[in-house]
Image (tube, rainbow, N blue to C red):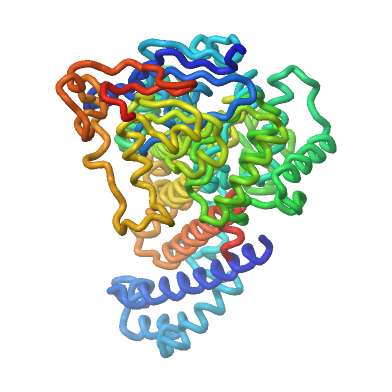
């Protein structure tokens, strides 16, 4: 099976006043049609930059220094603006973290949604939709994300709607172009717990029903587990472990993955305090030599400070980049 | 929106009354005896007292205030001591000239400031941004009278392209007034020759008046656009495939316009004040010139009249700014 999205040895730098941030350091990921991949890692590990790079909307100053991304046999790194327009929203689309700030506060929901439809029709060279058609399609899209009174919602401005409602609208916008690949960047992080569950249910339902290929990014392992078949664990711009969700969650092999899972509150566990990983995420201007995790790693030895561990296969569809992987 | 407008109008009326009361207080606490001033230096005490009675200045302050407010409401601003004409009549002559100048200058400021602010935000640190940066810094830095004289010397004296000063040549006949704005009236009457003359007279003073305003509109709009273009909803709009021209012209500009409009409102009031200098340099027959000559002659009724007119125009602008805000931003509309 050929991959729908493949990211090979992807390196990304962001120059800043203080020096160059080495944000992504050799990312390898691939995703087949219909697959759901979760990317998990703590804040600042490069998840969002990676996700946005897939859509060509990463930070303006970001520079790819090595590697490539291919989507549907198109080299994403070599597209111009016109070619991007035939991809964004139509082939690859994205849902975002904070549904308040990602909707334009001065335009009605209906206006924003139908703008997306107009843009897609133009991008695909289809005839412009009539007003009624746009209306009908907007209603359809909102109903698809289980909004019961689409007419009222379309006439509303974002500030008049709840967070969960706004996230549904963003999902509807992302699905408007019937994309092949959906990138969900922390889609539940900014929501209340009960709303989180609803949105996750909705997403899972849509993924099943529409057969979507999904990259879901989160620092919430629970949310990832609800959606993704496979998980990639990222640390400081590097994928450290990748495998089937169940494997990773039950038998983590990388010390970082283990630390991350140990830091989760466990409702059935009897320990009182959570185990935090010591230290903080490293400064990416001067990342640690060798394995980027070694300063915080309980198993680190001298080899970890000098040599970058290679990605090694340690089971069916389970890879880990560690000199001292756990058993 | 209707309710919002009504409330704003009510506030406007209240502020107007406040301003009227304030001008009354200032004229009464200001040093100098108006009756003696009117009577002249050689007047006897008897003559001063007669005038005092004639002008109602011997009555208690409260009564004077009631009369003053009553006069204001019926449109009576008193008479100028110098010309002995009614102030209302004189204002009717001078206000349209100033208003025309300010409106043209403001239009220039907006038409140039907003698009170029937008362009320099989109092409930040590129050539166009550098050009507009020089333009806006000089706009804020150049003193109006000096810049005005410079333009007169170059365009009027050296190149002889434009007239040096005035509103119309002495030989031209102003059209029968409709709006009292020459540019509009000449067009409405179909008098294109006079329109051309009026236009060529207004260009230089309008440029001088608009320059600092243009500069600040441009800078504010640029700064806002830069900020808005980095906001989340712009990222989202790009991700949804909306083309960049629409993103800049609608998604970003609409958000960036709010502070720009506030700046426009502020600048409008500022412009009304700075017409004094520009009108003096260009001999423009407006209220600035009128205020200066009246103040120099200690003719206080016209000064009060000018104060009221400028205050009134400024308040109307502020109200329009508020309404524009509410029209653009639905959050303000619903938040009472």
The percent coordinates of residue A123 (x first, y second) are 68, 20
Seen in the picture, residue B307 relative to B13 is either above or below; the reply is above
Left or right placement of residue B282 versus residue B189 in this view: left
Residue B84 at x, y percent in the picture: 49, 65
Find residue B107 and report its image quarter.
top right
Indicate the quadrant containing the N terminus of chain B: top left, top right, bottom left or bottom right.
bottom right
Frontmost residue, A280 versus B123: A280
Image point 40% across, 59% down: which residue?
B294
Q: A119 above or below B260? A: above
Q: Is residue A183 left or right of residue B184?
A: left
Q: Is residue B102 visible?
A: no
Residue at 36% across, 17% down = A311
Quadrant, the C terminus of chain B: bottom right
Residue A160 occupies which quadrant of the picture? bottom right
What x and y, as percent, mark residue B103?
54, 43
Rendering quarter of residue B136:
top left
Number of disc labels: 0
Q: Which residue shows up at 18% across the image and 19% down it?
A: A303
> Is residue A12 visible from the viewing direction of this image?
yes
Residue B141 image position (x, y, % from top left): 30, 35
> Furthest-bottom residue in view?
B60
């Amino acid at each position: 099976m050929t991959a729908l999205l493949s990211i090979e040895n992807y390196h990304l730098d962001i120059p800043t006043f203080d020096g160059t941030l080495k944000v992504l350091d050799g990312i390898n990921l691939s995703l087949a049609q219909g697959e759901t991949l979760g990317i998990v890692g703590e804040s600042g590990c490069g998840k969002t930059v990676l996700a946005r790079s897939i859509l060509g909307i990463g930070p303006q100053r970001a520079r790819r220094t090595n590697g490539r991304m291919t989507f549907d046999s198109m080299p994403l790194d070599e597209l111009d603006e016109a070619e991007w327009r035939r991809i964004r929203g139509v082939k690859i689309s994205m849902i975002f973290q904070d549904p308040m700030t990602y909707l334009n506060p001065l335009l009605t929901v209906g206006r924003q949604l139908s703008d997306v439809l107009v843009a897609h029709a133009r991008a695909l060279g289809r005839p412009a939709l009539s007003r009624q058609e746009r209306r009908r399609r907007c209603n359809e899209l909102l109903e698809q994300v289980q909004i019961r009174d689409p007419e009222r919602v379309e006439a509303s401005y974002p500030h008049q709607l709840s967070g969960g409602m706004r996230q549904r609208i963003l999902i509807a916008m992302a699905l408007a172009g019937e994309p092949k690949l959906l990138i969900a960047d922390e889609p539940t992080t900014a929501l209340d717990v009960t709303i989180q569950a609803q949105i996750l249910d909705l997403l899972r339902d849509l993924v099943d029903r529409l057969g979507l290929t999904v990259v879901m990014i989160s620092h919430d392992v629970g949310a990832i587990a609800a959606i993704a078949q496979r998980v990639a664990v990222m640390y400081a711009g590097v994928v450290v472990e990748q495998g089937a969700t169940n494997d990773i969650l039950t038998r983590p092999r990388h010390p970082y993955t283990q630390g991350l899972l140990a830091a989760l509150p466990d409702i059935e566990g009897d320990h009182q305090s959570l185990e935090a990983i010591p230290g903080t995420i490293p400064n990416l201007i001067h990342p640690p030599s060798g394995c980027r995790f070694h300063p915080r790693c309980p198993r680190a030895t001298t080899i970890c400070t000098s040599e970058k561990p290679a990605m090694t296969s340690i089971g069916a569809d389970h890879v880990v980049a560690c000199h001292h992987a756990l058993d | 929106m209707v309710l919002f407008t009504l409330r704003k109008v009510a506030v406007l009326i209240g502020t107007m009354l406040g301003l009227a009361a304030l001008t009354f207080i200032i004229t009464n606490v200001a040093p100098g005896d108006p009756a003696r001033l009117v009577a002249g230096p050689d007047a006897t005490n008897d003559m001063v007292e007669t005038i005092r009675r004639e002008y109602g200045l011997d009555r208690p302050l409260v009564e004077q205030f009631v009369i003053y407010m009553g006069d204001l409401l019926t449109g009576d601003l008193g008479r100028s001591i110098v010309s002995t004409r009614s102030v209302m009549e004189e204002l009717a002559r001078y206000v349209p000239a100033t208003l025309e100048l300010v409106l043209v200058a403001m239009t220039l400021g907006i038409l140039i400031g907003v698009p170029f602010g937008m362009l320099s935000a989109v092409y930040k640190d590129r050539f166009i941004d550098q050009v507009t940066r020089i333009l806006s810094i000089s706009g804020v830095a150049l003193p109006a009278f000096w810049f005005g004289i410079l333009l007169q010397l170059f365009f009027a004296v050296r190149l002889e392209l434009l007239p040096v000063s005035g509103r119309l040549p002495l030989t031209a006949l102003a059209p029968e007034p409709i709006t009292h704005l020459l540019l509009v009236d000449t067009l409405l009457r179909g008098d294109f020759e006079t329109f051309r003359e009026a236009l060529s007279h207004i260009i230089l003073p309008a440029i001088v008046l608009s320059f600092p305003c243009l500069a600040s509109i441009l800078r504010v709009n640029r700064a806002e656009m830069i900020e808005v273009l980095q906001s989340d909803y712009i990222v989202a709009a790009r991700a949804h495939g909306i083309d960049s021209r629409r993103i800049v012209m609608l998604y970003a500009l609409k958000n960036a316009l709010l502070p720009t409009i506030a700046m426009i409102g502020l600048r409008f009031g500022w412009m009304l004040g700075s017409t004094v200098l520009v009108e003096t340099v260009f001999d423009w027959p407006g209220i600035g010139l009128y205020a200066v000559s009246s103040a120099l002659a200690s003719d206080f009724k016209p000064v009060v009249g000018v104060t009221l007119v400028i205050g009134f125009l400024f308040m109307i602008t502020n109200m329009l700014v508020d309404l524009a805000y509410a029209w653009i931003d639905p959050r303000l509309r619903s938040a009472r």
